[in-house]
Image (tube, rainbow, N blue to C red):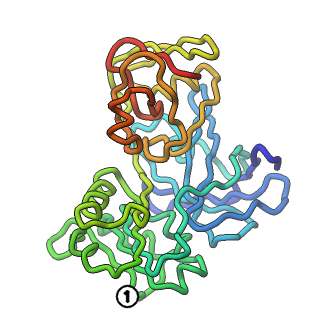
Amino acid sequence: MSASGLKLKVVAINDIAPSLRQLSLASADGAMLPPHGAGAHLLLSLPGQGRVHRNAYSLINEPGSRSQYDLIVRRVPASRGGSAAVHERLQVGDVIEAQWPANLFPPQRRARRHLMIAGGIGITPFLSYLQDPGVRASDHALHLCCRESEREVFAPWLPAGDPRLSFHWDADGHRLDIPALLAEQPAGTHLYVCGPAELNQSVLDAAQALGWPASQVHSELFGAASSGGAPFEAVLQKSGQRVQVGEDETLLEAIERLGVAAPCLCRGGACGVCVTPLLEGEAEHRDHYLSAADKAQGRLIMPCVSRARGSRLVLDL
């Protein structure tokens, strides 16, 4: 363990569903792990197919626990990255590298009420919320939108019979009426949504239409980003390197292929960590982070999801 990162040993693997795998990780040297708060994540470095993939996964442990880190990884169909490494290659006893826990999605301590909306695997950050003393002692509710079959999968981490927990799925009488739910919330409620892009956008649009203060709306995106598109050349101005971005890879993946450790976190266009100055070329923006004004100015790009509209981009990297 060092200030720059962690070496973690896989101490347990549990396939809780055909596409969901739980990992338990402990310090490789037996030391206590750094503490983390509710909503925190780990950025894992996972070897696979000739390169290292860096993927962020939410910690589902009780906040502050230091003996091991637990997380759940969904297998993404046709994955070339982290989920394939976790589901196909990782074994008990393997040692992997990770950054220290970070948190871009914490519960807001001054909230009068916490309203959580999760979509599928997007429930994972809320599993730690529900173990947080501050959240548990406050007024809160969790609405989980998932396949009906997944209700039992997540049950071990959820309080049995708690009226503050509601399940929703695509069947008559079970769909979540997002505008109605948001309209009935008392003043001072903070809204948290984590799930695929469609759910997140529906919740954010409803909150905006109802006049929710932006400071009381928090989101985290779960789901694979669309990477496909026409190939193009990327020029890294500072390093003088050039790379051809293939039609089936992201700009970020191509940069990493050069051995450049570009900043990144969610890899889905939501967190803003990878925002990079764009010096030349026009971007095809696919992110959910930059404002409309930022995109119109054309001076920034998020390499994890966005591409070139033309044949060439020059980045300040």
Name the spot of residue 253 as percent of width and height, x first: 51, 28
Which residue is identified by label 1? 163
Q: Is residue 124 left or right of residue 263?
A: left
| Corner quadrant of residue 104 | bottom right
Q: Residue at x 54, y 83 (%)?
A: 136
Name the spot of residue 58 as percent of width and height, x first: 55, 58
Q: Is residue 306 above or below residue 207?
A: above
Quarter that holds the C terminus: top right
Q: Is residue 50 left or right of residue 231?
A: right
Between 84 and 315, the residue placed more toward the observer is 315
Q: Residue at x 28, y 60 (%)?
A: 208
| Corner quadrant of residue 174 | bottom left
The answer, for residue 152, to whether it is visible in the render is no
Between 113 and 45, the residue placed more toward the observer is 113
Q: Is residue 206 above or below residue 19?
A: below
The answer, for residue 116, to whether it is visible in the render is yes
- Give the secondary structure at mark 1: loop
